[in-house]
Amino acid sequence: MELSYSALMPPMCLLLTTLAGVIIAFRWRRTGLALALISSLLLYACCTRFISQRLMAGVESQVPPPSPAALAEAQAIAVLSGDAYHGKPGTAPDDVGLVTLGRLRLAAALYRAHPLPILVTGSATDHNAESTAALMAETLEHDYGIKARWIEGRAENTYQNAVYSAAILTADNITRVIVVTDAWHLPRAIWSFAHAGMNAIPAPAERTYVPDRIEWSDFTPDHSSFERSFFALHELLGLAIYRLRYGPVKAAD
């Protein structure tokens, strides 16, 4: 988990390669400057809306939006954790983060339209006393008046979210589940649930809009574009690693 969000991952690793290029230039001038220039240009590109929006849209397009028929056939809703807030004992309690809260909001809306049993999944993070899944269940009940039926608090990554959730759901003869997460996370989540033997239905999450008109501001760097590029590249790399590590998804019987 720490490695996948470390400075070794793109686009953050471009900061390191830029620095490495500068250092190498003291010994091998052309090689070092070329490495620094290419890395800095790629880093700049990842900080622009023009590149980040297209990266994100490309990731999200790997999973098409669900059909009304597929949603109607679902047997349960599985909500994957994102971030969590580590509070200060005695003053501010632990809570779900903004990413996780957005997923819970979508799950609540889905529940209103399709009143299915809900599973929340995610282990403890940042030294929190409770698992993120437990915090999610508390938020669902307190803020939305919805009680989660299952709380899966061991999963530390997306693949474990799927495997541990599948074990719980299949024990109740549930095989068709709506997977709730961000649109950029859906390709890896859906693949993981399918690999775990589930009929995974993507939640109708909000997707990145790429305007037809290109403006000069699309090429100016900003922090939100860097974040979008990070999540997009993280998901592309993560899904590639999952496919290599766990093998192809077996066809359903």
Image (tube, rainbow, N blue to C red):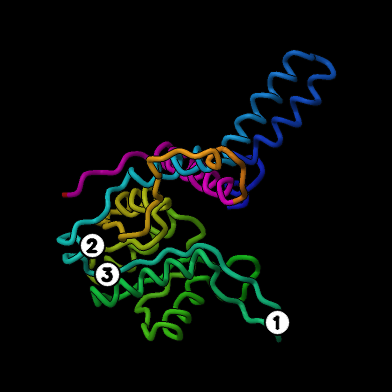
SS type, badge 2: loop
Identified by mark 1, the residue type is Pro
Identified by mark 3, the residue type is Ala
The label on residue 149 is none
The answer to the question of whether label 2 and label 1 lie on touching residues, with beta carbons closer than 8 A, is no
SS type, badge 3: strand
Q: Could you tell me residue 89's position as x and y percent? A: 70, 82
The residue closer to the viewer here, 28 or 158, is 28
Q: Residues within 10 Å of mark 1 (few under 14, many from 20)?
A: few
Which mark is nearer the camera, 2 or 1?
Answer: 1
Image quarter of residue 12: top right
Q: Could you tell me residue 241's position as x and y percent? A: 46, 39
User: Alpha-carbon distance for marks 3 and 1?
Assistant: 35 Å
Q: Could you tell me residue 91's position as x and y percent? A: 70, 85
Q: Residue at x 61, y 47 (%)?
A: 222
Relative to 176, is 135 above or below?
Answer: below
Q: Which residue is mark 1?
A: 89
Q: Which residue is mark 2?
A: 175
